Image (spheres, helix red, strand yellow):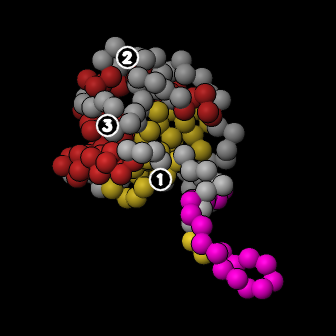
């Protein structure tokens, strides 16, 4: 959005929606409303404080999330939105937690797998990747969360003597 592209962020986490809180928009009307036929598409899309970034919140939490996400109406909705926006980002629940992401992944152009660093990260990432591959999803890359700025690994040059020391951990940037 900051580069001038039009971006729509959709909250397809019908079980624990959070996007509306993060972006400060209303959740009264959203994706669930549109798919169920309770609202018009334009009523469900809201501008955010970020120029060129719009949001379609989850809307009222449906009783049948998986059924809504397998509906042909989702395909129709995504087709319309692809024509209107440069990028359409669909946020889903975690891949290994519920079946919902598995119904969305094959319908989008690409998937960014988001993982949080913990003891089971590698196993879970491999399982999620295998599931996405089985579904025919196009995995574009990985986003890693939960990394501390204090951790790091690699060689670092210290002091004016030019001595190198080895350390470990991770880093990130904004």
The residue lying at 54 percent from left, 32 percent from top is 19
Binning the other alpha carbons within 10 Å of mark 1 as few (below 14), some (14 to 19) or many (20 upward) gives few
Residue tagged 1: 143
- Rounded to the nearest whole Å, what is the CA distance between mark 3 and mark 2? 20 Å
Q: Read off the magenta span.
A: 156-174
Work out which residue is located at the far bottom of the displayed protein and give it.
161
Query: On the rendered structure, is 104 left or right of 41?
Result: left
Q: Earlier in the sequence, mark 3 or mark 1?
A: 3
Residue tagged 3: 96
Instruction: Name the quarter where the C terminus is drawn.
Output: bottom right
- Rounded to the nearest whole Å, what is the CA distance between mark 3 and mark 1? 16 Å
Work out which residue is located at the far left of the displayed protein and give it.
134
Numbered badge on residue 62: 2
Residue 124, position as x, y percentages in the image: 33, 45
Work out which residue is located at the far right of the displayed protein and give it.
160
Q: Earlier in the sequence, mark 3 or mark 2?
A: 2
> Under tag 1, what secondary structure?
strand
Q: Residue 13: in sight, yes or no?
A: yes
Numbered badge on residue 2: none
Binning the other alpha carbons within 10 Å of mark 2 as few (below 14), some (14 to 19) or many (20 upward) gives some
Magenta run includes residue 162: yes
The residue lying at 36 percent from left, 51 percent from top is 122
């Amino acid at each position: 959005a900051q580069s001038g592209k039009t971006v729509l962020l959709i909250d397809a986490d019908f079980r624990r929606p959070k996007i509306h809180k993060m972006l400060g928009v209303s959740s009264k009307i959203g994706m669930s409303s549109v798919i169920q036929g309770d609202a018009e598409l334009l009523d469900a899309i809201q501008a955010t404080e970020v120029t060129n970034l719009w949001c379609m919140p989850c809307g009222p939490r449906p009783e049948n999330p998986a059924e809504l996400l397998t509906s042909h109406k989702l395909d129709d909705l995504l087709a319309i939105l692809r024509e209107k926006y440069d990028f359409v980002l669909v946020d889903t629940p975690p891949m290994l937690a519920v079946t919902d992401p598995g119904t969305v992944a094959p319908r989008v152009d690409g998937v960014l797998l988001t993982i949080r660093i913990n003891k089971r990260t590698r196993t879970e990432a491999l399982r999620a990747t295998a599931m996405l591959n089985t579904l025919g999803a196009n995995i574009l890359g990985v986003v890693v969360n939960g990394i501390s700025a204090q951790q790091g690994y690699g060689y670092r040059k210290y002091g004016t003597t030019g001595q190198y020391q080895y350390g470990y951990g991770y880093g990130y940037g904004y």
